[in-house]
Amino acid sequence: MAPSKVKPTNAHSVRPADINLVMAMGDSLTAGMGAASYNFSDWGEFRGLSFGAGGDKVVVAYQQVVKEIEQNGTFDSTEDFTVVTQPFYTNATLPANETVYRKFWAPDCYHYSQYGHALISSWFWQNMLQPVGSKLATANLNSPSLPLACPDAVKN
């Protein structure tokens, strides 16, 4: 998909190819903590592997900011900026036999591995392409969301 022919002035008209910068608010999961670690001797942040903002060099941790932003309506008053929650993780499906799939987790069994970030990013991407008000609040963490969703080929 190509970027819009004319730079969008409305945040709701932006196409994925128009995006040049991705930022995230979060915590150690957003920062890719342990994502490429095999043990604790190589433990660290791997922000470039993070499912939500891979490649971003600055990730700041904020508690409950997204929830507060959504509830106070601050970003609902202009056309050039918006905040949209991606609820795919709300009702995530865990392994049916309740066994831990070690490949999904970093060595600390709390943070995601590189594989875990890749799997979650497929569900995150699918959620981002769903319209506001119609976003699925489910993800099957046993497998990626394949085939990857493609943006509508709307010409603008």
Image (cartoon, helix red, strand yellow):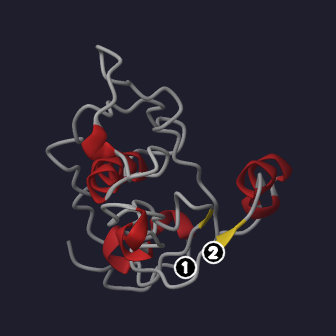
- Residue 58 appears in which quarter of the rendering? bottom right
Q: Amino acid at mark 2?
A: Asp
Q: Quadrant of the N terminus?
A: bottom left
User: What is the number of the mark on residue 117?
Assistant: none
Outermost residue, right side:
72
Outermost residue, top side:
97
Camera-nearest residue between 85 and 110: 110
Q: Which numbered disc, 2 or 1, marks the residue that appears first in the sequence?
A: 1
Q: Residue 100, image x and y in percent?
A: 34, 29
Q: Amino acid at mark 1?
A: Thr
Circles 2 and 1: CB atoms closer than 8 Å: yes
Position of 16 with respect to 60 (left or right) is left
Q: Residue 86, image x and y in percent?
A: 51, 47
Query: Mark 1 = which residue?
Result: 9
Seen in the picture, residue 133 relative to 86 is either above or below; the reply is: above
Query: Mark 2 = which residue?
Result: 80
